[in-house]
Amino acid sequence: MTKEVRVRYAPSPTGFLHIGGARTALFNYLYAKHHNGKFIVRIEDTDIERNVEGGEASQLDNLKWLGIEYDESIDIGGPYAPYRQMERLDIYKEHAEKLLEQGAAYKCFCSSEKLEASREEQKARGVAAPTYDGTCRHLSAEEVAAKEAAGEPYTIRMRVPENVTYDFEDLVRGQVTFESKDIGDWVIVKANGIPTYNYAVVLDDHFMEISHVFRGEEHLSNTPKQMMIFDAFGWEYPRFGHMTLIINENRKKLSKRDESIIQFVTQYKDLGYLPEAMFNFFALLGWSPEGEEEIFSKEEFIKIFDEKRLSKSPSMFDKQKLTWMNNQYIKKLSLEEVVVLSLPHLQKAGLLPEELTAEQHVWATDLIGLYHDQMSFGAEIVELSSLFFKDHIEYDEEAKAVLAGEQVPEVMASFKAQLEELEEFTPDAVKAAIKAVQKATGHKGKNLFMPIRVVTTGETHGPELPNAICLIGKEKAIDRVDKFAQ
């Protein structure tokens, strides 16, 4: 490529960093880094009524957490600043005036009531996609001046060229074509002087020298409007690529109201997912590498990324695959790192104090170590380890079936006696006590181990039994045996 690759992720601070936004940012980042280019984050904050407190920070902070480092933005600056649209209003105003002067745009004085009435009338006639009826398109200079003198508010509309075909080679979808006759004259500047998205984005992309635009499929229909602006100024288009939808497991478009899927990156962070795993998962959400391998480092993704392998089909958000992938990354962590990841969740749940003694920290480390290889995310430790914090055990049907064995009373009486004699309560000592029960009663295998597991832990499956009993503690283990015998 002769021209430097410059791509951008341009979120609106009307919400927090969402799954879809994270994927868009990631694919732009990978494309830029693969081609030794620049990745820019630009804030499109012109929808001032819907901007939310913390939205801007969520976008930037969570991108950094994911490992998606940008080269230019509002917090680090860059040669094309400012990177926040509300700080670029003079640029939009100046160029709107140029469009008015050359007749490519015009002032529209239609009230919202008139526009709504026109839309309803068109719908009544069976028009599926109502467009502006052109009332102000042919106003004379004198009529415009009179309306302005009377103080009538106005928007500025683009004068859509007649009989023009807009076609381009989409980097994902291939050849795409739109006809100007299907697009009504559209607003580029609102009555309050703030530019609309389709107008401002073009000026920003041009002046920031954006070479490629990768964005979601929902922006495809915006492209011809943006091409009109490029054409009006005689500017070169960037290359466009529109990524397919993300769908849920029911193959429905992922909606922010879909409660079956966690929607925002910060929620995954708070649950104890790892940023490297999320990066890996998002990179495979609509893009596929060659071969069967699915676990890659960021550096490997940058090396192998090829936009030609972006999917043309919707991408399913597979929750099970995400938890599997995060588990693969957790397994690679040291025990100390897993403790840092999961201990706060035990404390937040009130199961452990905020300030731990040295003895409590050792106990918590051993507890978390039992589930190191099993854990899919940090917060899962609360559910996985619940047996260690129960005062009363409720046996499920599977457990009751185990305890119905005729050998169980004998096994448990012998086990209690062995526990009471233990001076050191270590995994090795507990293991020796179980062997002594086998020798004393003659019971072995499931007939021996299953009753001991169910009575002490309340579960039929779980971590290494001597380790678990040791962490339960001698006093609580004996108490659970006594309650079973009652």
Image (tube, rainbow, N blue to C red):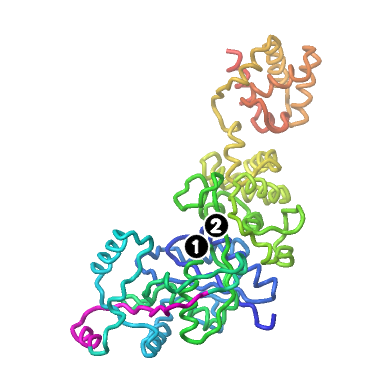
Give yes or no for residue 157 being in the magenta stretch.
yes
Q: How crowded is mark 1: few (under 14 residues within 10 Å), some or many (20 or more)?
A: few
Q: Is any atom of residue 173 visible in this view?
A: yes
In this rendering, the answer to whether 251 lies above or below 77 is above
The magenta stretch is 143-166
Residue at 73% x, 32% y is 464
Residue 447 point in image, percent of width and height: 74, 16
User: Circle 2 is placed at which residue position?
Assistant: 245
Q: Can you say which quadrant of the picture contains the C terminus?
A: top right
Q: Would you say 146 lies left or right of 373 here? A: left
- Evaluate if marks 1 and 2 touch, with contact meaning CB atoms under 8 Å apart: yes
Residue 231 point in image, percent of width and height: 49, 83
In this rendering, the answer to whether 465 lies above or below 102 is above
Residue at 63% x, 16% y is 401
Q: Can you say which quadrant of the picture contains the N terminus?
A: bottom right
Quadrant of res 34: bottom right
Query: In whole angstroms, how far apart are the C-alphas of marks 1 and 2?
Result: 8 Å
Name the amino acid, label 2: Leu
Residue 413 point in image, percent of width and height: 68, 13
The residue closer to the viewer here, 460 or 442, is 460
Q: List the single residue furthest toward the left.
A: 150
- For label 2, the SS is loop
The residue closer to the viewer here, 150 or 231, is 231
Q: How crowded is mark 2: few (under 14 residues within 10 Å), some or many (20 or more)?
A: many
The residue closer to the viewer here, 334 or 96, is 96
The residue closer to the viewer here, 270 or 103, is 103
Name the amino acid, label 1: Glu
User: Circle 1 is placed at which residue position?
Assistant: 218
Number of numbered callouts drawn: 2
